[in-house]
């Protein structure tokens, strides 16, 4: 059974490859900020983190699954989205060095929660079925990260385009003292959650392995 990753995230692609899956990659055309703004305006409330990431994950997967189904694709389409929550504030990608620096000054020595939305769409015989779930992992940052280390980390550009302004599997990992939950959730997707969703749709996770360990 084929797999398509509806994401441009290098971290999500890396996770699937490490799990033995070489997916087709298709970027979704979803205006995330516009979707959240329109939904919150229509419902008259601020979406909590879990609903935020789940809505975007489902829209991303659907945006890619629809044209793939028309092309005759059969298999699983995976969409995902992540947000970091600290004291009730939802922290997405900082985009600028100033925002990332301020973020790190506020996070050191504290614990927040990474929310990761997952949507798996099974395209089969021209029909689509979906399963979705949110995974969470708490992240505790070292209290002794100094200003010079923060400046050096931000200067690498790594934290600018990732949820919460940190990574756990690259340079940022040295500044994280503890992760509680599936560690892959913090990288970009929970592999254990994806396995459960594939099984919920009647699939076999090991049947998706199509990548040689040495490749």
Image (cartoon, grey):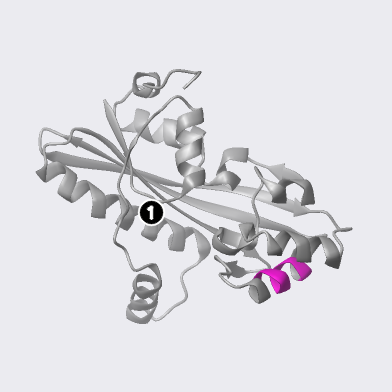
Instruction: Name the spot of residue 69 as percent of width and height, x first.
Output: 14, 42
Q: Is residue 203 above or below residue 139?
A: above
Q: Across the whole image, how many numbered discs are drawn on residues?
A: 1
Instruction: Name the spot of residue 64 as percent of width and height, x first.
Output: 25, 50
Would residue 192 be visible to someone looking at this image? yes
Residue in the picture at 77% in, 66% down: 151
Residue in the picture at 39% in, 24% down: 205
Q: Which residues are magenta?
A: 100-105
- Quadrant (top left, top right, bottom left, bottom right) of the N terminus: top left
Instruction: Name the spot of residue 112 as percent of width and height, x first.
Output: 69, 58
Q: Which residue is mark 1?
A: 57
Give the left or right position of residue 6, taking residue 87 as reference: left
Residue in the picture at 71% in, 51% down: 172
Q: Please tell me whether residue 101 belongs to the stretch shown in magenta.
A: yes
Q: Secondary structure at mark 1?
A: helix
Residue in the picture at 67% in, 59% down: 156
Would residue 182 be visible to someone looking at this image? no
């Amino acid at each position: 059974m084929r797999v398509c990753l509806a994401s441009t995230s290098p971290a999500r692609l890396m996770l699937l490859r490490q799990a033995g899956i070489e997916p087709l990659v298709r970027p979704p055309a979803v205006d995330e900020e516009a979707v959240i703004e329109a939904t919150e305006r229509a419902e008259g409330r601020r979406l909590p983190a879990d609903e935020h990431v789940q809505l975007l994950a489902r829209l991303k997967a659907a945006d890619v699954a629809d044209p793939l189904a028309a092309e005759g694709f059969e298999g699983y389409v995976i969409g995902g989205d992540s947000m970091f929550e600290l004291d009730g504030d939802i922290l997405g990608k900082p985009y600028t060095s100033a925002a990332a620096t301020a973020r790190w000054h506020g996070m050191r020595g504290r614990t927040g929660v990474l929310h990761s939305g997952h949507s798996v769409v099974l395209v089969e015989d021209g029909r689509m079925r979906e399963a979705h779930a949110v995974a969470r992992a708490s992240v505790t940052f070292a209290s002794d990260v100094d200003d010079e280390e923060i400046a050096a980390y931000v200067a690498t550009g790594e934290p600018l385009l990732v949820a919460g302004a940190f990574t756990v599997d690259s340079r940022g990992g040295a500044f994280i003292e503890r992760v509680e939950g599936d560690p892959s959730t913090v990288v970009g997707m929970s592999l254990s959650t994806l396995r459960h969703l594939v099984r919920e749709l009647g699939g076999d996770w090991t049947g998706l392995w199509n990548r040689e360990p040495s490749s």
